[in-house]
Image: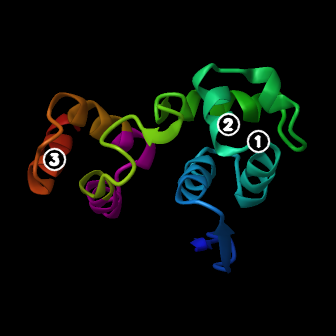
Amino acid sequence: MLYTHLHVNGNDFSLVLYGFYSDQEKELFKKLVSVSGVGPNTARMVLSSLNVNELIQVIASKDLPSLKRIKGIGEKTAERILVDLHNKVGKVDGTFVEKVGGLHNTIRQDALVALSQLGLDKTKTEKMLDKILLTASDLPLEDLIKQVLKQI
């Protein structure tokens, strides 16, 4: 089984298909690419240097020196990765999970896509979604979107 992610480069609209050994590795790649200043090549370098569990441990413990040892990762980029991803990933029983709603929370993802299409900032929207889902994780998609829009 090969897990893939189609990455669209916003600068020149080129398409690149990346392959991964596991779904967890693919999800972590997508999270890394969402960090400002981290592109697909840097994310690949990080995942080539550390396996999924090691990287999650580094992020969870905010281990800056371990990230800085990776080729192409400077102090500022390492700090951004730790700050942006610290609350998004965790380690439970040795497996990768997202802290809100598990690995396959499609309602959260659907709400994020819908709100992004409305022009909302992705980072702020993710934080609002996470905050709402921590208190009411069983909200239907429509209600979740309404809650975020009320907070704006």
Left or right: where 28 falls relative to 109 = right
Left or right: where 94 falls relative to 106 = right
Q: Which residue is mark 3?
A: 144
Residue that appears at 55% across and 48% down: 31
Q: Disc 2 vs disc 1: Cβ atoms closer than 8 Å?
A: yes
Foreground disc of the pair 3, 1: 1
Residue type at mark 3 is: Leu
Report the span colored magenta. Answer: 110-126
Locate residue 19, reporting x and y percent. 66, 71
Label 1 Cα neighbours within 10 Å, binned few <14 / some 14-19 / many ≥20: some
Q: CA distance from mark 3 to mark 1?
A: 35 Å
**Quadrant (top left, top right, bottom left, bottom right) of the C terminus:** top left
Q: Disc 3 vs disc 1: Cβ atoms closer than 8 Å?
A: no
Mark positioned earlier in the residue sequence (2 or 3): 2
Mark positioned earlier in the residue sequence (3 or 1): 1
Please determine whether, in this image, residue 36 is positioned above or below residue 44: above
Foreground disc of the pair 2, 3: 2
Residue that appears at 11% across and 45% down: 139
Q: CA distance from mark 2 to mark 1?
A: 6 Å
Q: Disc 2 vs disc 3: Cβ atoms closer than 8 Å?
A: no
Q: Which residue is mark 1?
A: 50
Please determine whether, in this image, residue 140 is positioned above or below residue 68: below
Please determine whether, in this image, residue 87 is positioned above or below residue 95: above
Label 3 Cα neighbours within 10 Å, binned few <14 / some 14-19 / many ≥20: many
Look at the image and tell me whether residue 6 can be seen. Answer: no
Locate residue 7, reporting x and y percent. 61, 71
Q: Nearer the viewer, residue 15 or 88?
A: 88
Q: Which residue is mark 2?
A: 55
Residue that appears at 75% across and 56% down: 44
